[in-house]
Amino acid sequence: MESKRLVPLHAELEFGEIERAKKPTAFARAVLATSKAETALTLPDVDIVIDLGISRTIDNSDDLLVVQDYAASTATRKQREGRVC
């Protein structure tokens, strides 16, 4: 009997794979939160939320891709936390 399962959940997945991640399970659910968690799906029965507290901006307006990571604000972290119920 397997004791854990890793199921990815991101915007590029097919619909069926997203639905699989949302299905009820006997396993504890842990979510690694990113800035996408602010607007993404709300998942039921989440036991643990791991938020690295990082946000990211991407700017390529000058034909040069600039990716900048920075500490997420308290409001942003609270919003991520509220996406799980």
Image (cartoon, rainbow, N blue to C red):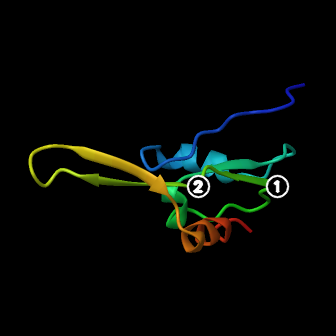
Mark 1 Cα within 10 Å, few/some/many (few <14, many 20+)?
Answer: few
Secondary element type, mark 2 = loop
**Is disc 2 in contact with disc 1, using a CB cutoff of under 8 Å?**
no
Mark 2 Cα within 10 Å, few/some/many (few <14, many 20+)?
Answer: some
Task: Say which amino acid is labelled 1.
Answer: Asp
Secondary element type, mark 1 = loop
Q: Quadrant of the N terminus?
A: top right
Q: Which residue is rendered at x = 68% and y = 50% of the image? A: 31
Q: Which label's residue is closer to the chain start, 2 or 1? A: 1
The residue singled out by tag 2 in the image is: 53
Q: Which residue is rendered at x = 50% and y = 49% of the image? A: 15
Task: Say which amino acid is labelled 2.
Answer: Gly
- CA–CA distance in space, label 2 to label 1: 18 Å
List x then y, in percent, for residue 57: 34, 55
The residue singled out by tag 1 in the image is: 47
Give the camera-side residue of 68 and 83. Answer: 68
Give the camera-side residue of 77 and 45. Answer: 77
Q: Nearer the viewer, mark 2 or mark 1?
A: 2
Q: Quadrant of the C terminus?
A: bottom right
74 over 16 or under it: above or below: below
- Specify whether 5 is left or right of 65: right
Query: Residue placed farthest to the right in the image?
Result: 1
List x then y, in percent, for residue 19: 60, 51
72 over 51 or under it: above or below: below
